[in-house]
Image (tube, helix red, strand yellow):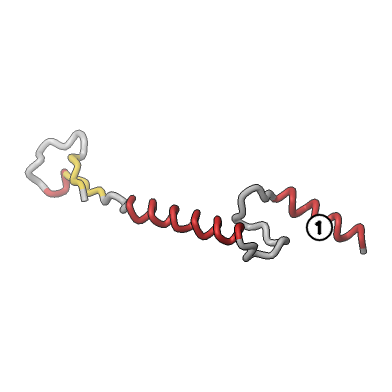
Amino acid sequence: MVVLRKPGKPKYDVLKAYRPIVLLNTQAKILTAIIAEQLMYYAEKYNLLPTNHFGGRAKRTASDVVHLLVHKIKNE
């Protein structure tokens, strides 16, 4: 936690003249991103996800889903 002075206060001996700011835990965010990247790498490498699963995968966009849907509709 970091305590900052509020601007424009006449006295800084009062507790209300300060603003506590809590900093986020960036180490946990970095570690989570690294683990998620590794999991996606192994999921792609070993084909653990079905071919029609598009959410959260690299090089798969919403337009790919629309093209697949149109293709399936036309073939029926």
Q: Going by the image, does 18 lie left or right of 53?
A: left
Q: Is residue 47 shown above or below 65?
A: below
Q: Going by the image, does 10 lie left or right of 44?
A: left
Residue 31 x, y percent position in the rendering: 38, 55
Residue in front for this viewpoint, 13 or 64: 64
| Residue at 92% across, 60% down | 75
Residue 22 x, y percent position in the rendering: 26, 51
Q: Going by the image, does 65 lie left or right of 26?
A: right
Image quadrant where one finds the C terminus: bottom right
Residue 49 x, y percent position in the rendering: 64, 64
| Residue at 88% across, 60% down | 73
Q: Amino acid at mark 1?
A: Leu
Helix, strand or loop status at disc 1? helix
Residue in front for this viewpoint, 19 or 56: 56
- For label 1, the residue is 69
Residue 58 x, y percent position in the rendering: 61, 50
- Rendered image quadrant of residue 53: bottom right
Judged from this view, the residue extending furthest toward the left is 13
